[in-house]
Image: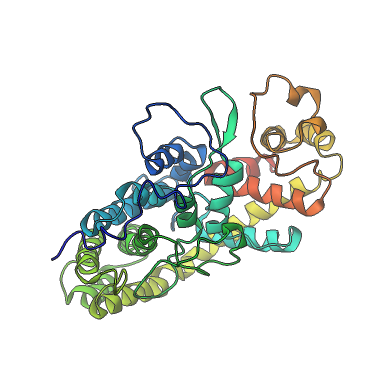
Amino acid sequence: MQKKKFSEVAARNGDKNLTARRAPLYEREGDIRSPYARDYTRILHSTAYRRLKHKTQVFFNAENDHVCTRIEHVAHVESVAYTMAVTLGLNEELTKATAFGHDLGHAPFGHYGEQVLSSLSEKYAGEKFWHEKHGLRIVDELELLEDDAGRLRNLDLTYAVRDGIISHCGEVDENGLRPREELLDLSTIERPGQYAPATWEGCVVKLADKVAYLGRDVEDALSLGLLDRDDLAKLSRIFSGGGAVNTTVIMHDIIVDVCKHSSPQDGIVMSEEYFEKLTAVKQFNYAHIYKNPRFNAFQRYASLIIETLYGELSGVYGDVFGNLARFSEVYPALGGAFSSWLAKYCNPDILPPQLRQNRPASDNLKIYGDLSDGRVFARAICDFIAGMTDAFAIRLFDEQLRF
């Protein structure tokens, strides 16, 4: 197998179009990291990344330590994408940073939580919620880090990493990924999968996202009893002609196949044989796992939690912080958490004295302004709920049941 086939088209650390930041967080003299390595560590130290360890990937099973969570999926994607990037000669640091940040925008309770939140957002905020776009919103507007002067600032990642986050949709079935040529305004992207990523590295992450979850979901479904050995035998015949089929086999075989067949001329591509196998595994998973009736109770539970939290918080619109103070007397956990979080993104002059005092200095975007716009407030509630872990959402919901 020829290696480093993409070295001439890899993203360069000195490409100012791809490494551009909107308003640099800070620059350190003598920093030995590349722009993409700095993005990687900013994501690593973000609270949004940390919360992924308690967010559902596919299976909601908080008491089982061996069921894959969102943060493990991110690590799997990074592993697959990094191996491809090294072999193909792409920018490894850009690939790792993009993979690490690609799922920051996920809501609690997995894709079903995303669907519920999208319905609420479309109805009340006038726009659909989709995790790729929300991931960009997190790194651009919501996640905060202290700069070297101790002031809270937005992450301000490079264009290439931001682009990889919003363009990573792995649900699009296509064989032969190529980067788009235009470095468009990312805020104008209207739906998942609308555009290919702007870099070859982003294309690799997009494919790795699909490769990483299929095998692991099979293993989890088997351990939780959604699949039995007969089901596994069917999948084995589909993928390996009767041999072993698990995360290791699926990842290894597809990574090798992609690295063998990809080229700058043909794109990031796998052989027709393995593309058909990957498609067949995905169809198997949808039929036997993702649409399994045993998910119905979980879906109703997730819907009840998210809709209840949204409904309670929407009632404080108007004199928001005054209403939240009264609301917190009854529901201190939900009211206090929302009030403290919301204050970081509002004009300081609308904050009550207790929220103005002892707050860290900040220069971040005040994206909710004065909270006078009902749709902006609805979006703020959706942003708040989207950032929750499963466990935190359940805890705040349970507070509603105590009298």
Q: Is residue 144 left or right of residue 321?
A: left
311 over 228 or under it: above or below: above
Q: Nearer the viewer, residue 90 or 229?
A: 90
Task: Give the residue at x 53% y 28%.
Answer: 147
| Number of marks drawn | 0
Q: Position of residue 25 (x, y in %)?
A: 53, 34
248 over 285 or under it: above or below: above
Q: Position of residue 60 (x, y in %)?
A: 47, 53
Residue 394 in sight from this viewpoint: no
For this orientation, the residue located farthest to the top is: 358
Q: Is residue 300 left or right of residue 54?
A: right
Q: Is residue 240 left or right of residue 286?
A: left
Task: Give the residue at x 37% y 58%.
Answer: 205
Q: Quadrant of the C terminus?
A: top right
Q: Quadrant of residue 317?
A: top right
For this orientation, the residue located farthest to the left is: 1
Task: Give the residue at x 76% y 48%.
Answer: 377
Q: Position of residue 289 (x, y in %)?
A: 40, 68
